[in-house]
Image (cartoon, helix red, strand yellow):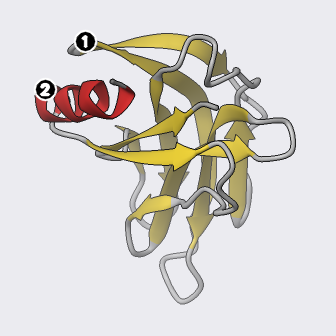
Amino acid sequence: MFRTTGALVAAALGASILITPSSASAASDWKCYGTQVKRCATVWWDQSADTYRARAKITDVAGGGSYQVKVTDVKLLRINKSDYVTVRSAKDHDGWHDTEDSAATATVDPCSPEQSYAVVATFSWKGASSGEKTWRPNQAWGNVCD
C-alpha cells in the first residue's frame, strides 16, 4: 500500500519519491542546484538510528565569484495528500560564512507513521552579485518499514 500511496503523492505534487527499505545500506544523496554558488538539500537517513532529518548546505564554488554564503530556515516536510506539513525546522541564523554553511533539523522516525518526506531551505549569498532563494528539490524520500 505504501508504494501505491507514494506514487500517487508524487504524481499529485510533481515530485519523484525515493523509496528506501529500512534494511538498505545506501546513503542519502544530495540534490544540488547552481554553478558559482551550489545549493544542496536532502532528507538524510541515519541508518544506525533509522531516523530522517532535513539537511541543507551552500558552497561558494572554487573559481566562481567569491561569495559569502549562509543557509537558514531548514524544514523537514511530511507529504500529506497534496500538501506539505512542516514536522521539524531549524532556523540556523549563525551568520555568513566564507566558503560553506550547512544546517540540519532534529530527527523523526520515518515509520511512526510511515510517511514520505521532503526538505526546503533558504539559501543566501553575497559578493559580486547577491541573491537569496528558498528552494526545495523536486524529490521526496520515503521508507518501507519492516
Q: In which quarter of the image is the C terminus?
A: top right
* Of 62 and 119, the residue lying toward us: 119
The residue under the point 65% across, 42% down is: 22
**Residue 12 appears left or right of 103:** left
- Residue 107 location (% of width, % of height): 74, 25
90 or 11, nearer to the observer: 11
Please, which residue is most extreme toward the bottom here? 63
Say whether residue 96 is visible: no
**Which residue carries the number 2 mark?**
12
Q: How many numbered marks appear? A: 2
Amino acid type indicated by mark 2: Ala
Mark 2 or 1 closer to N-term? 2
The spot of residue 122 in percent (x, y) is: 48, 35
Is residue 11 in view from this perspective? yes
**Which residue was labeled with disc 1?**
81
Q: In this view, does 16 lie above or below 27?
A: above
Q: Which residue lies furthest to the right in this view?
A: 48
Number of other residues with Cα within 10 Å of mark 2, as a class: few under 14, some 14 to 19, many 20 or more: few
Q: Position of residue 112 (x, y in %)?
A: 63, 12
Are the residues tagged 2 and 1 within 8 Å (C-beta)? yes
Question: Which residue is painted at 72% across and 29% down in the image?
Answer: 92
Residue at screen point 42% across, 53% down: 130
- Disc 1 on helix, strand or loop? loop
127 vs 56, nearest the viewer: 56
- Name the amino acid type tagged 1: Lys
Q: Residue at x 70, y 61 (%)?
A: 25
Q: Distance between the residues labelled 2 and 1?
A: 8 Å
Residue 48 lies left or right of residue 24; in this view the side is right
Circle 2: element type:
helix
- For the N terminus, which image quadrant? top left
Report x, y in % for residue 32.
Answer: 44, 62
Q: Residues within 10 Å of mark 1 (few under 14, many from 20)?
A: some
